[in-house]
Image (cartoon, helix red, strand yellow):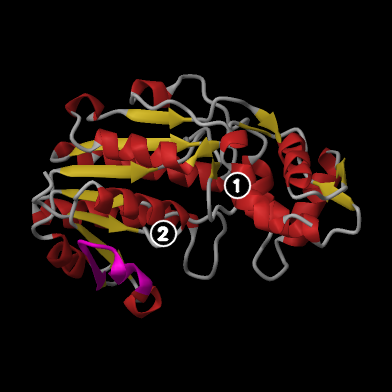
Amino acid sequence: MKETPICLIGATGFVGRHLIHRLARDGHPCRLLVRRPERHRDLRLIPGLDVRGVDPFDPDALAGHLAGCGTLVNLVGILNETGADTFERVHVELVARLIAAAQAAGVGRFLQMSALNADATGGASRYLRSKGAGEDLAHAEGGRTMAVTSFQPSVIFGRGDHFFNRFASLLRVSPGLFPLACPQARFAPLYVGDLVAAMTGALDDPATHGRRYPLCGPRAFTLQELVEYTAATIGRRTRVIGLDERLSRLQAQLFEHLPGKPFTLDNYLSLQTPSVCAEDGLAALGVQATDITAVVPEYLAWRRT
């Protein structure tokens, strides 16, 4: 397998960078497909990484770049819609394009990043429904010619994350009071190193073919508990005030019109379903879950006040 390149798309973000470094460390040659390669020149320093520019919605171009690859890893995902990048286009239509291109190029393995609670028909939000539809498509259509495995993580943490780091930034500028929407939303935070170990371990394991793995950390927390933990970790004496359902929904309706859409109604709807696992996918993949206390204080240390 290590002679054949692994092709990754959507891998310039938080999870992707951790995964690429792990694959490179393990000796896997990787081919990274991006829209604008000039924005990611730093990645060219990673041994064995071939960075190529491509329009991900151009099937012929995709098939050309996938030629010679044994595995395709799809990490593309958005939390909010922006312009033409709708949930349907990014999470479903793109998966269909990737499958067609991979099949045309003779790719035999497909790893799909989904989300915990992704469900095409029963998902609480459009995000979760589109993620579920994309995952179903990967298994149904992709599974006709490829060995497909999908991963359904809870919120992911680790150096460079967009969860603890984001709340740390907000807490640093808060005036001592921090109003929090959906304070009782539940998560089982998953360490990015454990996610990467699960994905790389599944690469050459036939037992994972056709499987969907819910992935969680060892403990579940409410959102309020996680924000209070973040405040304590960075040394901020901040009172976190949980908003009730009406005010949480109102905050979402207001914030989704702000630049960057920090919180949307669709985000609010996603939070109505607990992001905790009913089964231990990490254990099934032979990975021991890492607790937040073993990692978060290390990378938030520079944010201490």
Query: In the image, 237: left or right of 265?
Result: right
Q: Image point 35% across, 80% down: which residue? A: 38
> Nearest the camera: 291 or 8?
291
Q: Image point 85% across, 43% down: which residue? A: 246
Res 70 label? none
Image location of residue 52, percent across then percent down: 24, 71
Image location of residue 8, percent across then percent down: 28, 56
User: Quick one: quadrant of the N terminus?
Assistant: top left
Disc with the residue nearer the chain's start (2 vs 1)? 2
Q: What secondary structure is marked by label 1?
A: helix
Q: State whether residue 264 appears in this view.
A: no
* Amino acid bearing label 1: Glu
Query: In the image, 52: left or right of 5?
Result: right
* Amino acid bearing label 2: Arg
Image location of residue 153, percent across then percent down: 47, 37
Res 298 label? 1
Q: Nearer the viewer, mark 2 or mark 1?
A: 1
Q: What are the residue bounds of the magenta stretch?
A: 42-52
Q: Image point 34% across, 72% down: which residue? A: 35
> Dot 2: few (<14), some (14–19), or many (≥20) neighbours within 10 Å?
some
> Dot 1: few (<14), some (14–19), or many (≥20) neighbours within 10 Å?
few
Name above or below for residue 227 compared with residue 250: above
Query: Label 2, on which residue?
Result: 89
Q: Image point 61% across, 43% down: which residue? A: 296
Name above or below for residue 135 compared with residue 264: above
> Nearest the camera: 174 or 247?
174
